[in-house]
């Protein structure tokens, strides 16, 4: 299966590049600020499946640059989806838990009402609507708290801070499922193949996140334990760590439908984080 992936330097795209038959496109080949160019790239490569792993992910900066974020996160995926529907190419689009307002404590199901709290969430919701409206063979895969050995993410930030700090205060009232980019990449490939095999019958919105649900403080403690770092973590509420963009408190995702339709179970994030810590450690050793 020949798979075209948008977002060459992103966490998920870098993991997707490990698979045979995958071609990744970066900004030089397909700039998401030019939706027409993205559509043209799909026509040019004529792949067996397309995965959009690209996005404007600077959540706080989106508050000042919502128009740009809406083009990249909203209009570009819609343009990709329309071409894929026209050419009958399966399309997997990665979205986010931030389309929800995070009320309550129950896990959100794919058909729950959406109400984003910030510009990033609104831009991603626009993308979801564009993809769904295009129809065809598609999967909108909402995920949360993405971590990996690449790019900027919470695990790498905690490890960096642990080099100079022996105590940290970390938000403990936001709850969600930390999800490894490698697990997301594997899920996307499975979904893409299933869409090719089953067609539009399994099209729709699905959720995928690591298990069990945890707080950012829980994740920080796990990172330090797995990396054998002596750092004391103090729980603090979101209100004590103000940011330009409001974050949902409840990012729990109900992933049952994904497992039922595609046979993809929630990965254990602790094992995935252990693998990330090991990979980063090996990389550091090789650089000595």
Image (cartoon, grey):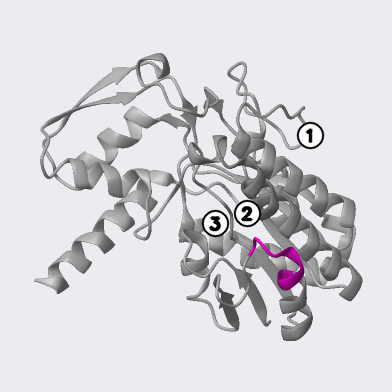
Q: Pointer 3: residues within 10 angstroms few (<14), some, or many (20+)?
A: many
Of residue 234 and residue 183, the one placed in the foreground of this image is: 234
Pinpoint residue 205: horizontal percent, then vertical percent: 76, 46
Pair 2/3: label in front: 3
Pinpoint residue 188: horizontal percent, then vertical percent: 63, 62
Q: Earlier in the sequence, mark 1 or mark 3?
A: 1
Residue 40 visible in the picture: yes
Of residue 34 and residue 179, the one placed in the foreground of this image is: 34
Q: Which residues are magenta?
A: 32-38
Pinpoint residue 24: horizontal percent, then vertical percent: 56, 76
Left or right for 168, reference 114: left
Name the residue carrying label 2: 264
Which quadrant of the structure image shows residue 98? top right
Pinpoint residue 35: horizontal percent, then vertical percent: 73, 64
Q: Earlier in the sequence, mark 1 or mark 2?
A: 1
Q: Earlier in the sequence, mark 2 or mark 3?
A: 3
Name the residue carrying label 3: 184
Name the residue carrying label 1: 111
Left or right for 241, reference 105: left
Q: How many marks?
A: 3
Locate the C terminus by quadrant: bottom left
In this rendering, is residue 168 above or below 134? above
Q: Pointer 2: residues within 10 angstroms few (<14), some, or many (20+)?
A: some
In this rendering, is residue 271 above or below 224? below
Is residue 281 in the magenta section?
no
Q: Secondary structure at mark 3?
A: helix
């Amino acid at each position: 299966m020949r798979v075209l992936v948008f977002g060459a330097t992103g966490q998920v795209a870098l993991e997707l590049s490990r698979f045979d038959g995958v071609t990744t496109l970066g900004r030089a080949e397909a700039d998401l600020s030019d939706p027409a160019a993205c559509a043209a790239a799909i026509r040019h490569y004529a792949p067996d499946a397309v995965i959009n792993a690209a996005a404007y992910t600077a959540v706080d900066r989106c508050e000042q640059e919502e128009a740009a974020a809406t083009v990249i996160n909203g209009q570009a995926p819609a343009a990709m989806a329309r071409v894929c529907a026209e050419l009958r190419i399966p399309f997997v689009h990665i979205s986010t838990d931030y389309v929800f307002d995070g009320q309550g404590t129950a896990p959100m199901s794919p058909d729950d009402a959406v109400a984003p709290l910030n510009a990033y969430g609104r831009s991603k919701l626009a993308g979801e609507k564009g993809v769904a409206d295009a129809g065809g063979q598609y999967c909108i895969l909402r995920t949360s708290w993405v971590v990996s050995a690449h790019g900027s993410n919470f695990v790498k930030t905690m490890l960096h801070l642990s080099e100079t700090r022996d105590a940290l205060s970390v938000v403990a009232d936001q709850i969600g499922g930390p999800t490894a980019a490698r697990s997301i990449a594997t899920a996307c490939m499975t979904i893409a193949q299933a869409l090719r095999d089953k067609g539009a019958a399994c099209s729709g919105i699905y959720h995928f996140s690591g298990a069990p649900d945890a707080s950012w403080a829980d994740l920080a403690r796990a990172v330090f334990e797995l990396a054998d770092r002596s750092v004391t973590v103090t729980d603090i509420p979101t209100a004590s760590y103000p940011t330009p963009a409001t974050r949902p408190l409840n990012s729990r995702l109900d992933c049952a439908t994904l497992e039922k339709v595609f046979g993809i179970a929630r990965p254990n994030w602790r094992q995935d984080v252990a693998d990330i810590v090991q990979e980063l450690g090996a990389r550091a050793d090789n650089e000595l």
